[in-house]
Amino acid sequence: MADGKLQVGNAAPRAKAATGDYMPADVSPNRRVQRRYSIRLWSVRHARLLEWFYARFAKAFLLLHPLWKALGYQRVEAPVTFVEKHVKGLLFDCRMCGQCVLSSTGMSCPMNCPKQLRNGPCGGVRANGNCEVEPDMPCVWMKAWEGSRSMMAGDAIMAVQKPVNQSLRETSSWLRVTAQAASEADADRATKSQGT
Ligand code: SF4
């Protein structure tokens, strides 16, 4: 506000952004207007392929559990988070909530919903299937439904998601899922050995 004017939208707001409402710099919902969502939409269209790939990737990550354990999960958190953030940022516009639900949402990240709804769309979806808040953006939940229909485990979209635990932001979902799967496998083995 150095020149005495309120800053509206981001540095280069388009006509539809000029509503006159004050909008702090860099938090405008219009900042994504210029994006074409092409990669995100590609991921939804190829949800089945990504589901197949992720299943194998998760298995490989789990096989590396002894390595993560030897190095220390805490120590590998930063580099793994860095890779996860960039890979998923490119493919899904990932916001690093730390509690990934892509496998249950047709590979459409619900954190891209401006209202961050984790359990389906709001009542404001436009007739053309776009978002109420960001009119140029396809509703992430419309896309989630489309993507889920091509997935083997697509009905997982019906599962109710827990509220986002904000304390897990910017942490690696890959590592947490792996650590959890490893501890479940250990518990299984312990139960079986007690039974013999
Ligand atoms: S659900 Fe969370 S971790 Fe998964 S892609 Fe979206 S922001 Fe990233």
Image (spheres, grey):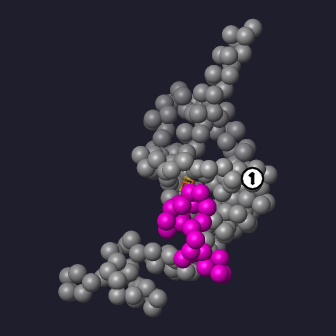
**Displayed-image quarter of ligand 1:** bottom right
**Observer-nearest residue: 191 or 88?**
191
What's the residue at 73%, 59% (across, down)? 148
Give the answer, above or below, for where 69 lies relative to 55: above
Report whether 55 appears left or right of 111: right
The local secondary structure at tag 1 comes to: helix
Dividing the picture into quadrants, the one containing residue 69 is top right
Q: Check the image and name the residue furthest to the front.
A: 123
Residue 179 appears in the rendering = yes
What's the residue at 50%, 34% (across, down)? 73
Report whether 169 appears left or right of 109: left
Q: Check the image and name the residue furthest to the top.
A: 196
Residue that carries the numbered disc 1 in the rendered image:
155
Q: Check the image and name the residue furthest to the bottom.
A: 15
Q: Which residues are magenta?
A: 110-132
Residue type at mark 1: give it.
Asp
Question: Of helix, strand and loop, which mostly describes the magenta segment?
Answer: loop
User: Any magenta on residue 41?
Assistant: no
Q: Is mark 1 within 8 Å of ligand 1?
A: no
Q: Position of residue 38 (x, y in %)?
A: 64, 73
Q: Position of residue 88 (x, y in %)?
A: 58, 57
Residue 91 appears in the rendering = no
Q: Position of residue 189 (x, y in %)?
A: 68, 19
